[in-house]
Image: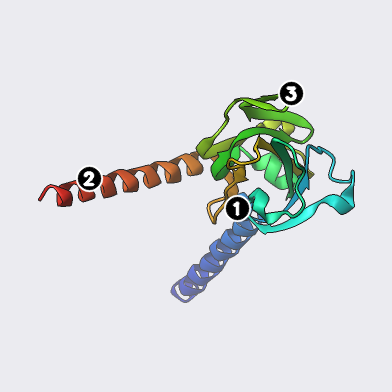
Amino acid sequence: MNLGKKPALIIANFYLRFLYFIIYFCTSSIFSFPIPFYENWKVFVGKNLNYSNHSNEWINIPSLTFRPSQIQNLPQTAVLSFTLYKDFELSKSTLDKLERDIGIYFPFITNVYEIYFNDEKIDSKGKVETDQVIENGTYAGYILLLPRRLLREGKNEVYVVLAGWKDEEIALYGNDDTRIDYISNHEQENSEIINIVLLSLYIFTGIYHL
């Protein structure tokens, strides 16, 4: 009798473990990150930190990269500025389980920039004063930290304000790696990219000197 019950107990134990795995898989933050952040941006000509303000003047950008050439009838000024906007959602369970810093990866940003997250400036580089670019702000391989204290349940808003000389590059680049993820994941991927570039340079240099 006991021997007959043993296979049934093994099967029951297997199904219980399987059920536990499914529950854990569905309730864990495995679905939370990464969050794609490459598509469906909005852009405004000038500085505007309120998406509902002049809502009909925001232009849809299906996917990054953004450049001023994508917009018609630009102002005839020496220095141009643009505001890019995108939001994302965070659930209460995701926030409760968040144990590591998260951020957004941008391959390249230029020239002067300010970045606002949930109504607070969190980073900036470069300076514009009285229609003059005083200091450049270009950055490659940019990992933007999203401060935990500013994260909200529900909608979170990101504004990127760009500025620069009209005849020079103003841009926010993006690709499939432009997403919200753990900072450690971004840093690891960025390090791998650098290693690949360096290896390619070494190989090219070696072949050149053969």
* Coordinates of residue 4 in the picture (x, y in percent): 47, 76
Q: Nearer the viewer, residue 148 or 4?
A: 148
Name the residue rendered at 57%, 51% in the picture. Answer: 174
Question: Which structural element holds mark 2?
Answer: helix
Q: Is residue 51 left or right of residue 145?
A: right
Residue 100 visible somewhere in the drawing: no
Q: Which residue is mark 3?
A: 130
User: Looking at the image, how many numbered discs can be counted on the residues?
Assistant: 3
- Label 3 neighbour load within 10 Å: few <14, some 14-19, many 20+: few
Name the residue rendered at 68%, 46% in the picture. Answer: 94
Cα separation between marks 2 and 3: 46 Å
Q: Nearer the viewer, residue 190 or 47?
A: 47
Question: Which structural element holds mark 3?
Answer: loop
* Comes first in the chain, label 1 or label 3: 1
- The quadrant holding residue 72 is bottom right
Q: Which residue is mark 1?
A: 65
**Labels 2, 3: front one:** 3
Q: Label 1 is placed on what type of residue?
A: Thr
Q: Nearer the viewer, residue 93 or 100?
A: 100
